[in-house]
Amino acid sequence: MKKVLLILIIIPFFISCSGKLTRSKAKKQIIEVYKYPKPVTREITIYDNTFGKSGTVYELKKFKKLGLLDYTDTGNYRRRGSVRATLTEKGKKYYIRDARSNSMEKNIIVKVAELHFDKVTGIKFNNEKNTAYVEYEVRQTNITPFGQVKNILRFKDIEDKVIKKTAYFEKFDDGWRIHKKDYK
């Protein structure tokens, strides 16, 4: 009789505990859903035949100094011309994919850093709606040479830093699931 009573008390206790959203469960789902670590990328122009190509040349000079690409500029201050760049072997390591392009301009996506999951900083439950907000931090790190270039007009400088984020979880009959939308 005592064994049966003990089992009736212990089983519901373990079942209720297994449905609780813990920091470790939240961490595991955040890493899986948002695919950490993941690259931080930047779009750069490798062909420019526009009147604003001087900005492209300014950027390409900085990348060339680091040995990431070579470029040729067929214009001068009196005629438009064009500028064409190709990645060097060093630069190709950070190439992700081609981006938008047209007859006047071609862009590519390069890796400038990585985002790594750091830690869960808090969980706020809404028991009435069976939801939870999980606050967490990711660290921007492993800055590539493309990310080390400073004072590029179109971009913020890339630096090692901690970024605060929030994930939204919903409780289902089989446990907690992260909602795909990232709130911060």
Image (cartoon, rainbow, N blue to C red):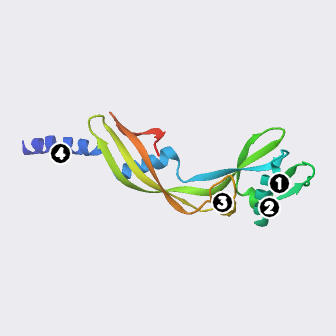
Q: Which residue is mark 2?
A: 61
Q: Which residue is mark 1?
A: 86
Q: Mark 4: which amino acid?
A: Ile
In-image side of 68 versus 34 (left or right) = right
Q: Which residue is mark 4?
A: 10
Tag in front: 2 or 3: 2
Identity of the residue drawn at 61% across and 59% down: 158
CA gap, disc 1 to disc 3?
18 Å
Q: Mark 2: which amino acid?
A: Lys
Q: Looking at the image, how many numbered discs can be counted on the residues?
A: 4
CA gap, disc 2 to disc 3?
15 Å
**Between 13 and 36, the one nearer to me in the picture:** 36
Q: Which residue is mark 3?
A: 147
Pointers 4 and 2 in contact (CB under 8 A)? Answer: no
Q: Mark 1: which amino acid?
A: Thr
Number of other residues with Cα within 10 Å of mark 3, as a class: few under 14, some 14 to 19, many 20 or more? many
Number of other residues with Cα within 10 Å of mark 2, as a class: few under 14, some 14 to 19, many 20 or more? some
Identity of the residue drawn at 37% across and 44% down: 133
CA gap, disc 2 to disc 1?
12 Å
Q: Secondary structure at mark 1?
A: strand
